Amino acid sequence: METAAHAAGDMMTARRNDSIGIGREAALQASSLLAVLFLVTVTLAGAGSLLQAIEKEPFAVAGFSPGDGEENVDVYGPISLEFTRPVDAGTLKNVVISPPVVGVWETEGRSAVFLPQERMDSHTSYTVTVTGAVRSEEGKSLWTRAEFTFTTGNGSARIVENGTSVQVDYIGWVREDGEWRVFATSLADVVSDDEHYPKSVFYLRVYKEEFSKLRRFPIIVGKEEEFKVFEERIMGLHIGDNVDFTLEPGIPFGEENTSLIHTIPLKEILPREENVTLDEAYWMFAGNLTLGAPGLHPFWGWNVTLVQAVETEDGGCDTGADGGEAEETEETGGCGSQERCGWAIIRHDPPAGAVVHPYGWDTLVSSINSTSVSVVHNLSEEDLYEVYSFQGSFPDRIFMVTELNLTAGYVVIDENWPPGIRGKETRWWLGIYDIRYPWEQPVEEEGGCCG
């Protein structure tokens, strides 16, 4: 019986072992299958990444122009970049150009072009840095930044011709005391160098103050008559070219007008009463032409009184008590350029001791009586070559004190503009700074030479 039990136990053990063997084999087979599936998955994933890497290369700069180290580059550029993927135009602001250049970026797909709006400086080294802040259209960062350097040449193949807009640097000289002296310039080096570029009276008294901001003057070739004499000298020049020449008296400012040069005694005696046209009286007395009406003299700036006013309606137009006639015209029916025909007598009524400014400087009313008014112009040597303007009704009339003789008692003023230059021989140096074609936006400079 014990033997039978052992036999049954051995049989059960053998069956259990067989079951275990079968389970191990199945487990091994399952593990092998999972390993194969894993390897397939990894292989497929690797292949996908490889395909994606092939399809989407890193966002980087693939090329640029001008080339690194290139010389004699046109001062108008352009500067071109080629990327491996389409670039986000809004991020091109992160491209740094040094020294700075004003311009705009234009993009098309993978290409970007920088168009300068102002010419670059000649013979200057520029560095372009494409920083990591530049992005692709998908928002990818630049793989690595790029940098290149180039040097500009003397200028451009552009040429001054009809229709071009030209920015011109200049120096203008006039003869004073037997030597050429600068009266105007756009160059800072000339301003600071008095030894080689002595300055004229006009420069020291007018130009230095009125045109303190140095400006080139613009010429649209073929459209501006006043610059025609300059156009003839610069036609055919390139950027960086210059020309030096002399102009005969009267060019370009016109001949001297002797009627605009006045000699004034430093002590004047004026008649107490003055004859004026009725039209002048109308404005002097603000339309009130009743006898005794008070008014203000437009030149002297002191009080006046209306003594007599006579209006004429027939044919001729009297201009004063002396019976003079104004020229008849068809338009006015006999009143010339006047709106009202007739004449008037006014009386000057300034108080003695009053100070008025008809010429801009102090003028003292030294005395007054029934027949005359005496005035004294208070000027000193410091007023020589000073610039003034008529006051009252003539504030736009500017003049320069060109002679002052305190001993002889007179002053000479010149309304010719520019004073001391108009009607005289001048010498010029013109340098071509910029040339723009009609379809381009010109860079305009306000101001210019001599007003």
Image (tube, helix red, strand yellow):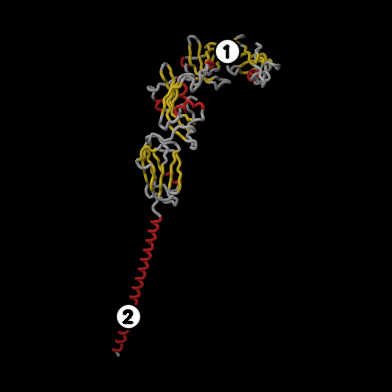
**Along the horizontal axis of the image, is 287 left or right of 357?**
right
Q: Is residue 402 visible?
A: yes
Quarter that holds the N terminus: bottom left
Which numbered disc, 2 or 1, marks the residue that appears first in the sequence?
Answer: 2
Q: Position of residue 424 (x, y in %)?
A: 47, 19
Q: Position of residue 267 (x, y in %)?
A: 53, 11
Q: Quadrant of residue 343?
A: top right
Q: Is residue 398 above or below residue 117?
A: above
Which amino acid, by three-letter code, is at mark 1? Ala
Report the front residue among 145 and 391: 145
Task: Name, please, the residue furthest toward the bottom.
Answer: 1
Residue 352: numbered disc: 1
Residue 101: numbered disc: none
Q: Is residue 291 visible?
A: no
Packing grade of label 1 (10 A; few <14, some 14-19, many >=20) is some
Task: Name, please, the residue furthest toward the right.
Answer: 314
Q: Is residue 156 above or below residue 413?
A: below
Q: Is residue 137 above or below residue 398?
A: below
Which amino acid, by three-letter code, is at mark 2? Asp
Whole-number angstrom distance, CA of label 2 to CA of label 1: 146 Å
Q: At 50% across and 10% down in the image, what residue appears?
A: 409
Residue 18: numbered disc: 2
Q: Position of residue 136 (x, y in %)?
A: 43, 50
